Image: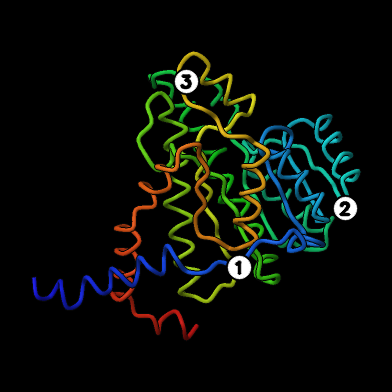
Amino acid sequence: MAFMKKYLLPILGTFLAYYYYSANEEFRPEMLRGKKVIVTGASKGIGREMAYHLARMGAHVVVTARSAEILQEVVAHCLELGASSAHYVAGTMENMTFAEQFVAKAGKLMGGLDMLILNHISTTMTSMAPFGDDIRLLRRSMDVNFLSYVVLSVAALPMLRRSGGSIVVVSSLAGKMATPFVAAYSASKFALDGFFSSVRQEYSMTKVNVSITLCILGLINTDTAMTAVAGILNIEPSPKEECALEIIKAGALRQKEMYYDSSILSSLLLKNPGRKILEFLSLKHYNMERFTNN
């Protein structure tokens, strides 16, 4: 008890005060002016709205999704809204070779990269149903919703290191809490948290000036989500336009996590200060000279 009062409680108080009340820089749209940004899954929903917000802010944007025809319309509207430049590259993230080559092509089109926004999901996640024995569904979800994110990030890292840029990972409450009827989707989103949160620690330890923002979203009123939950969930969805803007803000401000949901309880209960404290304390077990001297 004496140890707790003397050491643990002050550490806990200091950590929580820093975590919850540290002053964040105020977002300004001009932060994105002239920035070079990739947005995946940009043919509809949140991805398309992010592309439009970025265009209004004067960013260079390269968007991708499966449909070239729809992406042409998105790019045309981005240019109308004031994008410094706008391009598209159509393809599927089931193809890891495409994912890797796409980043290289986007970098050439823009002359570099400042922000990589990973937003796409597998088309198999369009309905809610109990998980049976469809391992192919699980594999496809993991490939598209997780592994392709890793491939894209690895391909983008050299450019992001040069620019001191950002990786923005769009995830879900289903990647922070058990969620029935979307087991494969949930597994892929939990994987994003485990991988990118660990890599964020590694970047910090090895002095890599690339931020990673994990965006945890509740139900958003995209057509895909509304179709999937129709007659199943009685939850008020949040607007995709505002959600898209909050994702961009979080990436620009280099926040570690962003929560966006119609219920304030989600962020209050799922931020999990206990985990953050343990992660912080665990660093003392590492030989930091091994990393700082490289």
At which x and y percent is residue 135? 43, 26
- Position of 7 with respect to 180 (left or right) is left
The quadrant where residue 212 appears: bottom right
Q: Amino acid at mark 2?
A: Ser
Q: Which disc number belongs to residue 85?
A: 2
At which x and y percent is residue 255? 54, 61
Q: Amino acid at mark 1?
A: Glu
- Position of 207 with respect to 37 (left or right) is left
Tell whether label 3 touches label 2 (CB within 8 Å).
no
The earlier-in-sequence mark between 2 and 1 is 1
Tell whether label 1 touches label 3 (CB within 8 Å).
no
At which x and y percent is residue 241? 68, 39
Vertical comparison of 265 with 168: above or below: above
Q: Amino acid at mark 3?
A: Met
The earlier-in-sequence mark between 3 and 1 is 1
Front disc: 3 or 1: 1
As helix, strand or loop, the secondary structure at mark 2 comes to strand
State how far apart marks 2 and 1 are (Cα).
Answer: 27 Å
Q: Which disc number belongs to residue 25?
A: 1
The earlier-in-sequence mark between 2 and 3 is 2
As helix, strand or loop, the secondary structure at mark 1 comes to loop
According to the picture, the residue beneath numbered tag 3 turns out to be 128
